Amino acid sequence: MNLHIKKLTGIKLTLVLTVIFCIVSLSGCTRSKQNEPNPSPPASKQPLALAVYYLKASEQDEYLVREVRHIPYTTDSVRAAAQEVISGQPLTKGAERVFPPSTKILGVKVENGLATVNFSREVLKANQGSAGEALAIQSMVNTLTEFPEVRAVSFQVEGKLDNRTKDWWGHVGLYDQPFQRNLAKVYEPRIWVTHPTENQVAGVPLLVKGSAMVFEGTVNIRLLDKTGEKLAEGTTTATEGMGRGEFEYRLTFKPPSPGQGKLEVFWASPEDGRILDKVTVPVRWQ
């Protein structure tokens, strides 16, 4: 009997010691985790590059200029682009914003290729002639149709399209909306490249796309390695020889070892062959 009691006492003691050990171990684990450094915060989102159109006037004409703006990352890039037309500070000399600066973008809804922009009522306070009104409308339309999901644009004011809204600034009005993309009055820059984008990995052949307003529509393209040695070159013609047209070309080249280089797109002066309006795009290859 005494032997049986001693065995039970030994078992209880073992259980108690086991529980104490577990508690101490768990406490140690908890302290260990608390003392570990916090995981690194997620990398910040990269800034967005948005194409935005502004108004510019010369002694002979009024026209649009296209700029690429870099803004903080946002998930609502279409709305951000619309607001940049209104509140962005143009970089091109002589370019200006034309929408009333107090205007707010209340929302942009994109559905079945149509972007509907909802402005605050301040947008109706502009004082522009018919040419300025038409170009202001087109600046917003061209900006939003840079997004591949947008093919046309309509305007509202505080969610409505009443008679006052349709009259807009008193000249062109909104009677013919939705509006379509139109680059005919975009005079600057002479050339821009939409593909490849900056530091994109170049495929073979390298697809080069963009817009040009140059003599006879002739566009020159060349690819250089990081030392400036020419890897390939070619010439293509934009869809318009006397105005603004689109161009597309596939440049075949043999990539050197993995590295980087630059794509150059330009046109040559018909008088002396000088390189004019050169656009440089850094690229990489693997």
Image: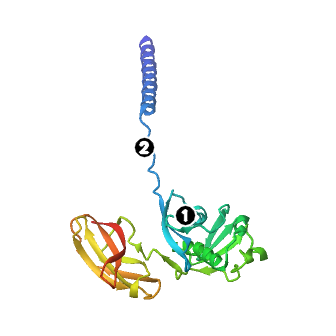
> Residue 230: image x %, image y %?
23, 73
Q: Nearer the viewer, residue 58 or 128?
A: 58
Residue kind at label 1, given as amino acid type: Ser
Residue 61 as seen in the image, left or right of residue 106: left
Residue denoted by label 1:
77
Can you identify the residue that label 2 sits on?
40
> Looking at the image, how many numbered discs can be counted on the residues?
2
The residue at the point 49 percent across, 68 percent down is 67
Residue 107: x and y in percent read 65, 65
Nearer the observer, 8 or 114: 114
Which residue is at the far right? 163
Q: Is residue 15 above or below residue 76?
A: above
Is residue 54 at all visible to an observer of this figure?
yes
Label 1 crowd (10 A; few <14 / some 14-19 / many >=20): some
Quadrant of the image occupied by residue 24: top left
Upstream in sequence: badge 2 or badge 1: 2
Label 1: which secondary element: helix
Q: Is residue 11 above or below residue 106?
A: above
Farthest residue, direction front:
59
Which numbered mark, 2 or 1, is in the foreground of this view?
A: 1
Residue 93 image label: none
| Distance CA(mark 2)–CA(mark 1) | 27 Å
